[in-house]
Image: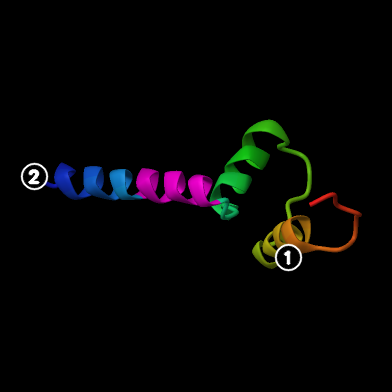
Amino acid sequence: MSAAPVRWRERYALARRALRQVFGIPDFERYCEHMRERHPGAPRLSEREFHALAIDRRYGASKPRCC
């Protein structure tokens, strides 16, 4: 009976991750997993730096954009 809450949490986490991808919301947890798996020795951004970079990539005027 204790397995049911675990499955519910896992489903909730998967749904949350999917919705973030659909709406283009940056996912810090996914970034951390990627860095651990693909770049284990590389330094990671803090959560604050990660979100600042994501906002700059999306809305920043640092690069000329066509749209």
Judge depth for marks 2 and 1 and give the one in front.
1
Q: Pinpoint residue 34: horizontal percent, then vertical percent.
A: 63, 38
Residue bounds of the magenta highlight: 13-23
Q: Is residue 62 left or right of residue 37?
A: right
Q: Residue at x 61, y 47 (%)?
A: 32
Q: Earlier in the sequence, mark 2 or mark 1?
A: 2
Nearer to us in this view, 39 or 52? 52
Q: Is residue 25 left or right of residue 10?
A: right
Amino acid on which disc 2 is placed: Met
Q: Which mark is residue 24?
A: none
Q: Which mark is residue 52?
A: 1
Which quarter of the picture shows residue 64?
A: bottom right
Label 1 element class? helix
Q: Residue at x 56, y 55 (%)?
A: 25
Circle 2 sits on which residue? 1
Q: Give the crowd class for mark 2: few <14, some 14-19, many >=20 residues within 10 Å.
A: few
Nearer to us in this view, 35 or 12? 12
Q: How is the image coloured?
A: rainbow
Q: Is residue 18 left or right of residue 52?
A: left
Is-magenta flag for residue 20? yes
